[in-house]
Image: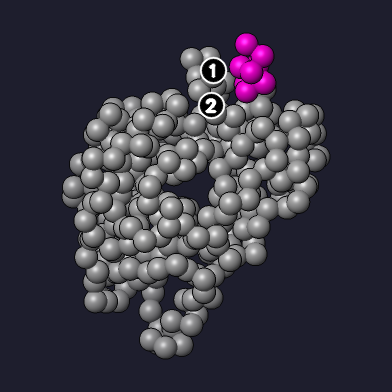
Amino acid sequence: MGFEDVGFARAEHMTPEAQRLQAWLKGGNHGTMAYMANHFDKRTDPTKLVPGAKTVISFVFNYYTDIKPDGEYKMAIYALGRDYHKVLKKKLKELGLKMKNVLGPFSGRIFVDSAPVLERDWARRSGLGWVGKNTLLIHPRKGSYFFLAEYIVDFECAYDSPMPDFCGTCRRCIDACPTQAIAQDGYVMDGSKCISYLTIERKEAIPGKFKGQMANYIFGCDICQEVCPWNRFSKKHDEPEFEPSETMISLTSADWENLTEKEFDNLFHGSPVKRTGYHGLKRNIAFLKDQNKS
């Protein structure tokens, strides 16, 4: 199906992860993302999300590419192609049918960043990598440019074990983050300072204190991945749906600044960029244009 790897973990209450999530929320690290505090029980116990669940099957799908837009404005590379939610969900539905042909009937639910599931923690529990200082899943031979997805099912499997943390004394991601969103010791992300949050999740105006710190990103951010030594092992994906259009790649700064709503709808139909919306994207561009002036 094109997935890079798969791992299996027992579906059970996530006690240490629940404690960390509670502390993270209490610290206000979710900014205006109030939904992160919703469905806490389901978020930390898959048996409440999927009754009868026995196994969380985790998948990783490579999205790395060295293709970058030509202009000065930048986007996280995962957003250059078609919306991964749709692409991966379609693949997993097809996989589910194949599984039932082999295993017989079973119950389960597919998740692609579409419900309160602690995806990185399940991937870590499934031996697909460790959660690094930048709070992303990292694999020692494959890097971190991956989408995550889950299939929570009602049958048992042979379960995998977590792998060690190989971040060591490295702090490149911490030092490289222009908004200082990563804690000085790593492993905690202040979402309210993250460029991805500011350009996508935050609906209000971007606070002026972030002027000069956005690194010309208008949607998402890849800085903590670009500096991560483990990403020297990243290889270009081979999924046609994630290839960017020539039009998007060739947009100049003036093209972005003069983008109309109709052009936005045509250009980003079926794209993750739809999440921020036309007005959100224009807000981001205007913020950068204003900071570059000053």
Kindly identify which residue carries mark 2.
214
**In this orientation, which residue lies closer to the viewer: 143 or 263?**
143
- Tags 1 and 2 touching, CB below 8 Å: yes
What's the residue at 75%, 39% (across, down)? 251
- Above or below for 67 versus 53: above
- Report x, y in % for residue 47: 28, 61
Magenta run includes residue 28 = no
- Above or below for 100 versus 87: below
Q: Which three-letter amino acid code belongs to the residue tagged 1?
A: Lys
**In this orientation, which residue lies closer to the viewer: 41 or 217?**
217
- Above or below for 99 versus 173: below
What type of secondary structure mainly makes up the magenta span?
helix
Kindly identify which residue carries mark 1.
211
10 Å neighbourhood of mark 2: few (<14), some, or many (≥20)?
A: many
Q: Is residue 291 left or right of residue 209?
A: right
Give the alpha-carbon distance from disc 1 to disc 2, as whole Å.
7 Å
Q: In which quarter of the image is the C terminus?
A: top right
Q: Which three-letter amino acid code belongs to the residue tagged 2?
A: Met
